[in-house]
Image (spheres, coloured by chain):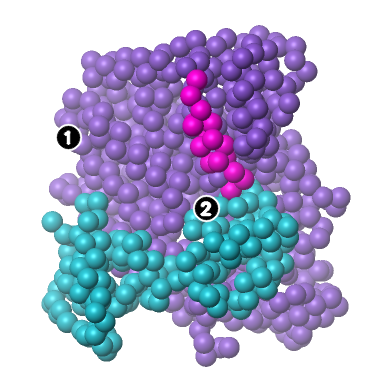
């Protein structure tokens, strides 16, 4: 049984103002895949947040239809789902690059020269701040702490960590990333 | 001992005998920190090899992260040889050596462990100051067992406390034992744990929850995730005890998505505990039933606040709630709830097993037991160490940390996370315990200690901390949401030598408004980094107020959550 979430009066429907009638040929199969990833959650407590995480896990972003499907599953409004999805900084609403490079700017990495390495990564990938490289191969994200402070400075590619970085290592990492 | 537990012990014994039976065992220490320097590749490469006389085993980190990747070879004689800074090539060389030779391979070895004294030109591991000065209670199995493997955990004395509590103690006894141990919350607030449990225990509500907080967003602290990824069964056992003591039947372990290694470890531990009758209906044949589940959250630092955490488990935005009602009266899904930090819970099994007086004999009068500290930054031996409370910071830095890693002396420490404090040299004589640390202006908090040498500018450090706080403010209370952003702007102009004369008063005024106008610690403690650094580095800060210092480089920070109207 689902735990009770959100408001008592249930409204289901498109209240986001976004046109969800996607004319894309794949939209039906996309919707099917999304409902699958929502219903396949292997946990007892299914919530809006857990469903969003499940969708992001399989698609690496939250498609608009997912918001609608999650609202249906969890019996809350579309606005409720948007409010959660827009709150947590890990959710994104456009497809990311093929690989995600997380660069840590936490204090341990900071005092060990992370800023220089981040600037270097920016230059190598031709990205300003956060975002995707031109060829959409790499997404660069700032991370507040990757949890391996003893090996700082640290970067991560798709959750795989690289520690004790220096200029040379960053060059190698980013160059292999660009080639892949 | 009940029959059910004896059966489990027998199974574990057989399993261990089979593993070690006249064989060489190679333990590869992995975990988040090990993975960052290539331990996974070593494990993969060694696991592919097959030799009937050598077993390769994945274990968690032993805390000496500066030496990682570490592998430990255990000879059939039970002598252990520790190897540091191993890579795939060296690991294979070591493997090959032990395939054919009985002698000890010495390259890359840094210590040994044996009941005898071995004359091989290496120190005994227990003679190294970074090991001998430690006292391991919550981290007793670090570097020894495979994360989540129940048989290895039981074989090292695991789940005895459950057996003892369920069949020899009443729930009230367990609460009293924890109360008497003097255990205080390790998440930052240092609230007496037994007292907290006694709020929930008498409630007659049919559904009660016990939660375990492993959100740990503090940069510089990785001990919660460390326990989860190295010895998750300690946590599972502690949580079951917590449930038994408070008559609760359901628990959640709360952790941020993306930390794959600790999540995998705790999920494995929970599954194996279910499979062996330690979770679920009638634990070990008793009348007590208990369920446990992992709850993942998105990226949000404030989700670590207790009521915000409950919102997140319910699947909503993780913003703090008004208190009262307190969680013990109305918490998760409006049911009575208890919440503790991972470290706090991890002490409980040993307290129940060995008694509260044993636990109290360590530490100081008001802060009993040990502290788990994470050293990082400009220090020779960054890593995770468990030390008895009451040790001075100086001793931790010199004896365990090995002093500054650069040519300049240690200038300051950043402790207790970004809402904690900055500690100057005059504060290094402070004893590590909750009250002494709070008096010094820094807080022990989650146990992260970031060491800065002379090259680090104090305004640059606090700009980094405040940048973190402004990025992570959940936005519910405007003094915190806008105040942190405002403070960041002021600190940024201090760093750019463009400060205005009354900037210090301005910072203080913002800090004060945040303190009185915010619901949770994120806003209330937001001024801490600045107030504590003023205590030790007033001159340096006033130099930057007077624009006497060289401008620093612009800091690259995410702008995703920055209120755009302030740009």
Mark 1 touches mark 2? (CB < 8 Å): no
Which chain does the residue under circle 2 lie in?
A
Quadrant for the N terminus of chain B in the image: top left
Q: Nearer the viewer, residue A44 or B203?
A: A44
Chain cyan in the figure, letter: A
Chain purple in the figure, letter: B
Query: Is residue B334 positioned above or below A84 on the image?
Result: above
What residue is rendered at 13% in x and 77% in y?
A9
Query: Is residue B170 positioned above or below B12 on the image?
Result: below
- Along the horizontal axis of the image, is B41 left or right of B155? right
Q: Nearer the viewer, residue A108 or A98?
A: A98
Find out whether residue B48 is within the magenta segment. Answer: yes
Residue B297: which quarter of the image? bottom left
What residue is rendered at 46% in x and 41% in y?
B229
Quadrant for the C terminus of chain B in the image: bottom right
Asked if labels 1 and 2 share a chain, the reply is no
The image position of residue B50, as x and y in percent, is 48, 24
- Say if residue A145 shows up in the picture: no
Find out whether residue B526 is within the magenta segment. Answer: no
- Mark count: 2
Residue B351: which quarter of the image? top left
Dot 1 corresponds to which residue? Answer: B281
Magenta residues, dominant SS class:
helix
- Along the horizontal axis of the image, is B86 left or right of B139? right
Q: Which residues are magenta?
A: B36-51
What residue is rendered at 24% in x and 85% in y?
A23
Which chain does the residue under circle 1 lie in?
B
Dot 2 corresponds to which residue? Answer: A160
- Which type of secondary structure does the marked residue at label 2 adopt? strand
Q: Residues within 10 Å of mark 2 (few under 14, many from 20)?
A: some
- Say if residue B43 shows up in the picture: yes
The image position of residue A41, as x and y in percent, is 24, 55
């Amino acid at each position: 049984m689902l735990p009770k979430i959100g408001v008592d009066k249930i409204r289901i429907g498109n209240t986001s103002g976004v046109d969800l009638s996607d004319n894309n040929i794949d939209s039906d199969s996309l919707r099917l895949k999304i409902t699958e990833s929502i219903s396949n959650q292997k946990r007892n407590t299914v919530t809006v947040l857990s469903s969003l995480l499940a969708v992001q896990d399989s698609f690496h972003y939250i498609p608009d239809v997912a918001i609608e499907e999650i609202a249906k599953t969890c019996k809350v409004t579309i606005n409720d789902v948007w409010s959660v999805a827009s709150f947590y900084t890990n959710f994104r609403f456009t497809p990311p690059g093929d690989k995600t490079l997380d660069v840590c700017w936490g204090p341990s990495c900071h005092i060990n020269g992370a800023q220089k390495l981040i600037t270097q990564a920016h230059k190598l990938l031709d990205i300003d701040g956060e975002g995707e490289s031109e060829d959409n191969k790499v997404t660069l994200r700032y991370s507040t702490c990757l949890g391996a402070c003893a090996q700082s400075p640290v970067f991560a590619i798709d959750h795989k960590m690289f520690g004790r970085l220096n200029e040379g290592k960053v060059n190698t990492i980013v160059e292999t990333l660009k080639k892949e | 001992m009940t029959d059910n537990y004896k059966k489990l012990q027998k199974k574990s014994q057989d399993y261990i005998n089979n593993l070690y039976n006249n064989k060489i065992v190679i333990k590869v220490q992995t975990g988040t920190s090990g993975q960052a320097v290539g331990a996974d590749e070593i494990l993969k490469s060694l696991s592919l090899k097959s030799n009937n006389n050598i077993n390769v085993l994945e274990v968690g980190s032993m805390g000496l992260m500066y030496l990682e990747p570490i592998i430990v070879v255990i000879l059939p004689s039970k002598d252990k040889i520790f190897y540091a800074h191993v890579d795939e090539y060296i690991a294979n060389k070591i493997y090959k050596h032990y395939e054919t030779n009985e002698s000890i391979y010495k390259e890359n070895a840094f210590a040994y462990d044996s009941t005898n004294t071995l004359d091989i030109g290496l120190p005994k591991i227990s003679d190294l100051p970074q090991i001998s000065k430690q006292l391991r209670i919550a981290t007793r199995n670090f570097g020894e067992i495979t994360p989540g493997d129940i048989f290895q955990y039981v074989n090292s004395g695991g789940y005895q406390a459950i057996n003892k509590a369920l069949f020899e103690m009443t729930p009230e006894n367990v609460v009293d034992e924890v109360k008497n141990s003097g255990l205080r919350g390790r998440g930052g607030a240092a609230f007496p744990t037994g007292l907290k449990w006694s709020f929930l225990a008498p409630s007659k509500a049919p559904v009660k929850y016990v939660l375990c907080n492993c959100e740990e967003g503090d940069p510089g602290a990785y001990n919660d995730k460390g326990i989860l990824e190295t010895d998750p069964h300690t946590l599972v056992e502690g949580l079951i005890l917590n449930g038994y003591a408070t008559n609760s039947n359901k628990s959640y372990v709360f952790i941020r998505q993306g930390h794959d290694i600790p999540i995998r470890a705790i999920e494995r531990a929970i599954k194996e505990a279910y499979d062996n009758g330690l979770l679920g209906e009638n634990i070990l044949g008793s009348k007590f039933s208990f369920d446990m589940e992992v709850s993942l959250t998105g990226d949000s630092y404030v989700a670590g606040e207790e009521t915000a955490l409950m919102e997140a488990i319910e699947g909503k935005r993780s913003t703090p709630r008004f208190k009262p009602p307190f969680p013990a009266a109305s918490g998760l899904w409006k049911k009575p709830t208890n919440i503790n930090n991972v470290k706090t819970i991890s002490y409980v099994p040993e307290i129940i097993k060995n008694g509260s007086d044993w636990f109290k004999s360590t530490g100081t009068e008001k802060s009993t037991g040990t502290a788990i500290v994470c050293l990082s930054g400009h220090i020779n031996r960054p890593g995770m160490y468990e030390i008895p409370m009451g040790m001075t910071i100086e001793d931790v830095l010199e004896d365990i940390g090995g002093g500054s890693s650069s040519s300049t002396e240690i200038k300051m420490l950043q402790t207790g996370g970004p809402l904690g404090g900055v500690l100057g040299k005059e504060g290094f004589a402070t004893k590590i315990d909750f009250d002494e640390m709070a008096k010094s202006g820094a807080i022990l908090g989650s146990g992260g200690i970031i060491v800065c040498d002379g090259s680090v500018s104090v305004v640059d450090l606090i700009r980094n901390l405040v940048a973190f706080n402004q990025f992570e403010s959940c936005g519910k209370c405007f003094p915190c949401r806008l105040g942190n952003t405002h403070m960041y702007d002021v600190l940024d102009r201090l760093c750019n030598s463009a400060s205005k004369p009354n900037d210090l008063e301005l910072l203080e005024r913002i800090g004060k408004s945040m303190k009185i106008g915010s619901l949770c610690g994120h806003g209330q403690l937001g001024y801490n980094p600045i107030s504590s650094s003023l205590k030790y580095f007033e001159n340096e800060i006033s130099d930057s107020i007077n624009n006497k210092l060289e401008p620093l480089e612009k800091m690259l920070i995410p702008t995703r959550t920055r209120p755009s109207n302030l740009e």
